[in-house]
Image: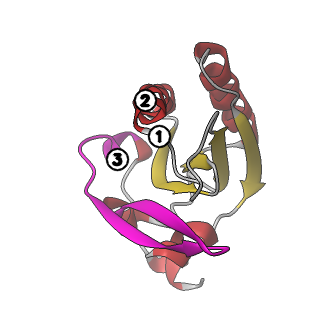
Amino acid sequence: MSWFRNKKFPAIEDLAGEDQWMVAQGEHDGRPMLVRVNTSAKAYAGHPGLPVRLGIAVPFHAPRADGMPEKAESQQLGAIEDRVFEVLGTGGRVVLVITTGGMREFVSYVRSREIAAELAQAVKAATTTHEVQHYVDDDPAWKVYQQFV
């Protein structure tokens, strides 16, 4: 963790733009797992201005037997994803999108717990097709992101 102290980070506002993403497949509890990883975030992982992890989880209505979404529901999830990215704006960065076990989770890092709560509420208020759950946790070392890169 000490390498973060010497690392130069760009201003959070300068992080906005086109991110590069990688798709990985694996298993979780014997079921398929699909993970999209924001590989651009490697350059600013551990950014001191984004110490709080916000997870926004969306349970599926009718997952397939393997826990993945049906095509029709995938389209609805795509609309929710667009909303998540729009709401996050410059308040944080989405770094992982995890699909497994009947739900999709958007993992992001944000400036504060207060901002995390506001962002989660904004996504919930704008989503009518699915229940939206969230959690907030301090993670200045970006441990969850580091597990996937």
Q: Nearer the viewer, mark 3 or mark 1?
A: 1
Q: Looking at the image, can residue 8 be seen?
A: no
Q: Are marks 1 and 2 in contact (CB under 8 Å)?
A: yes
In terms of depth relative to the viewer, which is nearer, 48 or 68? 68
Secondary element at tag 3: helix
From this viewpoint, which residue is outermost toward the front?
A: 65
Crowd tier of the residue under label 2, counting other residues whose Cα lies within 10 Å: few below 14, some 14–19, many 20 or above: few
Q: Quadrant of residue 139?
A: bottom right
**Which of 36/88 is in front?**
36
Q: Which residues are magenta?
A: 13-39
* Marks 1 and 2, how far apart at CA: 6 Å
- Looking at the rendered structure, the secondary structure element under dot 2 is helix
Residue of label 2: 72
Seen at 73% across and 40% down, the residue is 134
Is residue 116 at all visible to an observer of this figure? yes
The percent position of residue 52, horizontal first and vertical second, equals 67, 52
Q: Which residue is mark 1?
A: 70
Side of 42 relative to 49 (left or right): left
Q: Position of residue 109 (x, y in %)?
A: 57, 51
Residue type, mark 1 in image: Glu
Image location of residue 125, percent across then percent down = 66, 15
Q: CA distance from mark 3 to mark 2?
A: 33 Å
Which numbered disc flags the more N-terminal residue, 3 or 1? Answer: 3
